[in-house]
Amino acid sequence: MATQVTAARPLRRGLRIGQQRALWAYLFLAVPLLFFAGIRILPAISSLYISVHEWNIISPVRPYVGLANFQTLAADPRFARAAINTVRYVLVGIPAQMVLGLGLALLLQRIVRFRGLFRALYFMPFITPIVAASWVWQWMYSVHLGPLNKILQGMGLPAQGFLRDPGQALFAVAAMVVWQYLGFQVVIFLAGLEAIPRVYYEAAEVDGATGWRLFWRITLPLLNPTLVFSMVYSTIVYLQLFTQVLNMTFQDQGGPLASTLTLVLYVYQLGFQRFKMGEAAAATAILFVVILTITLLQMKILSKPVEY
């Protein structure tokens, strides 16, 4: 009897198999969570702290200045220009990217042969190194050596300035970004289209619906979750544009005449070229609030359940 009691105690005190599995799962989840906190959350908190200090990398004295860095940004015309340009990138790039991505996905859905090949070809720019792609596009836009101007001149049209023209440079960079993320949009939209049950189309066709009516009444509403994801993701990408602009305008970063300057490039120049870490951190805090606000608004306004 005593032996049975002694043998039963470890079973009552120990963890059951399900609890042990859950514990291991929590431990494995904790490792990437700690890594994420170390490289994302802690720098974000540090950025907020730096934004209210006069922060010099060399000087050990870093006095508290309150909102002075934010006031300096408000009076800086380059900050206003960078903010306006960033909004223009969003307004130009996202509609073009989503319309083209959805159109190509609809076309790919209609074909059977070579669909995987076309999907892979469209997706290749997304996995191409951004720096390499940016320099290739810079060469393509070259006034004297670029193939685009040679094609225009071959058609009897005048050569264009592209990246050297303040009126065209932003659109030239936006075109490269659209090209880069188009394949990703095609894959996302294609997955969303394949997830729509065929029974809805068949029922609508029985009622006489065809063509555009099927698209507006069936495809677009049921594709809403994919559209919301695509728009939120694209907005974050365009609000954080940096590498493409830096490399395509490397000799005049953000130029010409700050026509391609973005908020993230402005932060980079403030922090690592002019060593004004306090102002750079303040601009980063503003950008964080803008991205968070726009993302929440998009998810609130665009997300809506669809029932048939």
Image (cartoon, grey):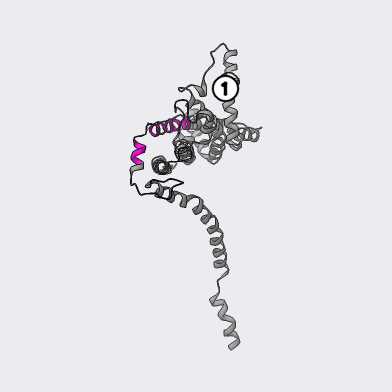
> What segment carries the magenta color?
70-95
Which of the two residues, 76 or 40, is positioned nearer the viewer here? 76
> Measuring 43% from the left and 33% from the top, which residue is drawn there?
86
Above or below, 170 against 48 in this view is above
> Measuring 60% from the left and 38% from the top, which residue is drawn there?
127
The prevailing secondary structure element of the residues shown in magenta is helix
Q: Is residue 74 magenta?
A: yes
Asked which quadrant contains residue 14, the reply is bottom right
Q: Is residue 185 left or right of residue 81?
A: right
Which of the two residues, 298 or 167, is positioned nearer the viewer here? 167
The spot of residue 58 in percent (x, y) is 46, 46
Tag 1: residue type? Ser
Q: Residues within 10 Å of mark 1 (few under 14, many from 20)?
A: many
Q: Residue furthest top?
A: 156
Asked which quadrant contains residue 110, the reply is top right
**Quadrant where the image shows the C terminus:** top left
The spot of residue 121 in percent (x, y) is 63, 33
Residue picked out by circle 1: 142
Which of the two residues, 137 or 65, is positioned nearer the viewer here? 65
The spot of residue 71 in percent (x, y) is 33, 39
Q: Is residue 118 magenta?
A: no
Which of the two residues, 226 or 72, is positioned nearer the viewer here? 72
> Measuring 52% from the left and 22% from the top, which residue is drawn there?
162
Q: Is residue 252 visible?
A: yes
Q: Is residue 242 left or right of residue 75?
A: right
Above or below, 102 against 5 in this view is above
The spot of residue 53 in percent (x, y) is 38, 47
User: What secondary structure is marked by label 1?
Assistant: loop
